[in-house]
């Protein structure tokens, strides 16, 4: 059965000290709360692929690759880069992601044409964008 | 569904009587299959008087049947294939199996033939892809569709 991995990805991100130390618990899924202290990490589920399908797969079979968009919003460029580096240094990873298990977690920089969703005000934001792939 | 003139692969089943004659067991985790060709050899019947080659139909060719399967050692679906191949090498127990490829038409169509597991070819193991293997079955009879 297909599962929501978002809470597990949040738990996994917060388990990285290079993330949790600067951001505290400010890892936000899909939306940014109004009282938005920086730095924070925002993420959402992006693409889902199903290369694990077989000719007789059944309805509700677990998806096989989940891609999450991650945006790191820092008070300075070096802070944002530092948090992104901490995530990159944790992959490739195999094992528990929150309460679930992943065969591999990997991270790539986002495409050049990716438009950050957290650039929504006149404030200057230092944003690093990553694409996190969860291989089930 | 009814009245479809083109079908997709999803829902296609591959079965074989691995352990008990005529008891067909579905092979799981198959991602692609190439049913056996129906092909004949040609016999050269050209004479000195001909100004074009005369190629006549010969005997039916022993074609191969292949399918690709996710692989997990000792998992039931993989183990059935391993045993069938081992039996073929030693020609013991059941090795010349009856195979069914069932096409997912509105009224399913079954292609039946016999054959033995000739080759188990593991695919290249890649970091972020599922491990698979390609199974080759040497057919020992002509396919019959019903």
Image: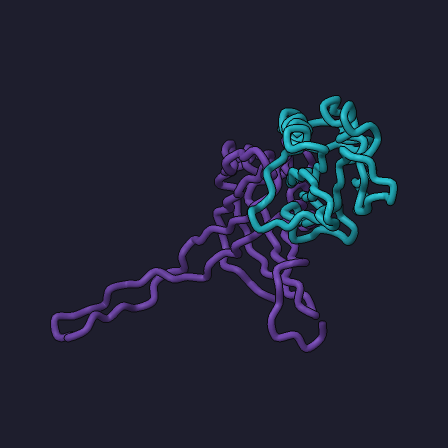
Chain colours: A cyan, B purple
Where residue A30 appears, as percent x and y from the top left, is 79, 46
Measured along the vertical axis of the image, is residue A90 above or below residue B113?
A: above
Residue B44 vs residue A61: left or right? Answer: left
User: A55 and A2: which one is in front?
Assistant: A2
Circle count: 0
Q: Quadrant of the N terminus of chain B?
A: bottom right
- Residue A26 placement: quadrant: top right
Residue at image coords 47%, 51%: B64
Measured along the vertical axis of the image, is residue B46 above or below residue A52?
A: below
Residue at image coords 45%, 61%: B38
Where residue B10 appears, as percent x and y from the top left, is 65, 58
User: B129 and A129: which one is in front?
Assistant: A129
Residue B76 vs residue B123: left or right? Answer: right
Residue A133, visible in the rendered structure: no
User: A31 and B119: which one is in front?
Assistant: A31
Where residue B72 appears, as percent x and y from the top left, is 64, 34
Residue at image coords 62%, 63%: B8
Q: Quadrant of the C terminus of chain B?
A: bottom right
Residue A83 vs residue B92: left or right? Answer: right
Where residue B32 appears, as percent x and y from the top left, is 57, 51
């Amino acid at each position: 059965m297909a599962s929501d991995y978002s809470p597990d990805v949040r738990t996994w991100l917060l388990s990285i000290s290079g993330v949790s130390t600067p951001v505290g618990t400010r890892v936000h899924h899909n939306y940014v709360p109004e009282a938005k202290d920086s730095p924070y990490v925002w993420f959402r589920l992006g693409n889902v692929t199903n290369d694990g399908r077989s000719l007789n797969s059944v309805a509700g079979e677990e998806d096989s690759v989940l891609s999450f968009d991650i945006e790191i919003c820092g008070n300075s460029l070096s802070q944002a880069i530092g948090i992104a580096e901490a995530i990159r240094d944790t992959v490739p990873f195999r094992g528990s992601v929150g309460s679930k298990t992943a065969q591999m977690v990997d991270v790539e920089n986002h495409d050049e044409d990716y438009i950050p969703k957290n650039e929504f005000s006149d404030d200057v934001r230092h944003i690093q964008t990553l694409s996190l792939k969860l291989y089930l | 569904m009814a009245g479809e003139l083109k079908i997709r692969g999803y829902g296609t089943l591959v079965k074989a009587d691995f352990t008990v004659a005529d008891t067909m067991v579905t092979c799981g985790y198959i991602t692609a299959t190439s049913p056996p060709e129906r092909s004949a050899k040609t016999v050269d019947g050209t004479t000195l008087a001909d100004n074009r080659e005369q190629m006549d139909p010969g005997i039916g060719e022993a074609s191969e049947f292949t399918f690709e399967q996710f692989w997990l050692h000792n998992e039931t679906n993989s183990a059935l294939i391993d045993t069938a191949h081992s039996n073929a090498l030693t020609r013991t127990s059941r090795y010349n199996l009856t195979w069914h490829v069932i096409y997912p038409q509105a009224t399913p169509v079954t292609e039946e033939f016999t054959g033995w597991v000739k080759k188990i070819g593991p695919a290249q193991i890649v970091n972020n892809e599922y491990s698979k293997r390609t199974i080759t079955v040497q057919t020992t009879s002509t396919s019959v569709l019903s």
